[in-house]
Image (cartoon, grey):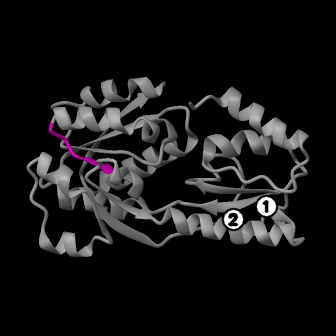
Amino acid sequence: QGSSATAAQIARKFVGDKADIIIPITTPSAQPVVAATRSIPIVFSGVTDPIAAKLVKSWEPSGTNVTGISDHKPIEPQLKLVQTLVSNLSALGYVYSAGEANSVAVLEELQQAAKQANIKIVPVAVQRSADIGTAARSLNGKVQAIYITEDNAVVSAYEALHKAALEIKVPVIAADKDTVKRGALAAYAVNQYEIGTETGKVAARVLRGEKAGSIPTSAVSKMSLSINQNTAKALGLTLSETLVKEAEELF
């Protein structure tokens, strides 16, 4: 439920159990694990910006007990997707958790890219998952679309955001395929299964004797498009044949 105290408690238990390796998935899980041990190997997974999250200092071998696989993806293709889906886009909402380092880092990237495209970003920070629906409704009349990244608090309560977005007739563009399956209009995203596979390969290297700190942090960069046609219909949007053909998955 997004509790940092619970995450820290879980991390301490793993350390106390003297695990051979710890594999935390996403930033809120990885940060307390990295804080809990300097000796047990850590291979994080699905972290958007491991440097901003202070898990490692760079993409080079850390020299510590930490390495991992990032799901970082360039923001420009995602912003271009929003422009393709929403004609005359001038203002884009961004609902995020202020307490999540990755989400703050993505906001900065989004603002830089949007400035070049002459698009205004309207950010709305939430403190709790229960506030997601209210945050979306606050964007009514201010934006033509909403973008969300792989923010744990937001994604976990996506149904509330989806309901609110349909009410105000604004499409939500996500950063992962699973949220599109749950109702977001579209996403240009990396493959989470591939991230898991690459994480497993790195974990195997560590378990065979390599030091985690000698393995560079890397990212899965291949991106694919997914579209929810039911949501497009609900919003009265007509999708181009070109875009539909490009989609790797249609829901």
Q: Is residue 214 visible?
A: no
Q: Secondary structure at mark 1?
A: loop
Q: Residue at x 53, y 65 (%)?
A: 193
Kind of residue sitting beneath label 2: Thr
Q: Residue at x 33, y 67 (%)?
A: 225
Stretch of the chain drawn in magenta: 169-173
Left or right relative to 115: residue 156? right
Give the percent coordinates (x, y) of residue 245: 21, 75
Q: Work out which quarter of the rendered image holds the N terminus and state it.
A: top right
Callout 2: few (<14), some (14-19), or many (20+) C-alpha neighbours within 10 Å? many
Q: Using the rendered view, name the quadrant where residue 37 is placed.
A: top right
Q: Main secondary structure of the magenta part?
A: loop
Q: Are marks 1 and 2 in contact (CB under 8 Å)?
A: yes
Going by the numbered disc 1, the residue's amino acid type is Ser
Q: Is residue 79 above or below residue 105?
A: below
From the image, tell me which residue sits under label 2: 217
**Quadrant location of residue 43?**
bottom right
Residue 173 horizontal/vertical position (percent) = 30, 51
Quadrant, the C terminus: bottom left
Give the quadrant of residue 162: top left
Q: Earlier in the sequence, mark 1 or mark 2?
A: 1
Query: Considering the numbered disc 2 on the image, is that residue within a helix, a strand or a loop?
Result: loop
For the residue pair 244 and 36, the one nearer the viewer reads as: 244
Q: Vertical placement of 131 versus 201: above or below? A: above
Question: Magenta stretch: residue 185 in it?
Answer: no
Q: Which residue is mark 1?
A: 62
Q: Residue at x 15, y 31 (%)?
A: 141
- Depicted 134 relative to depicted 34: above or below: above
Let me know if residue 170 is in the magenta part.
yes
Horizontal arrangement in the rendering, residue 40 relative to residue 106 (left or right): right
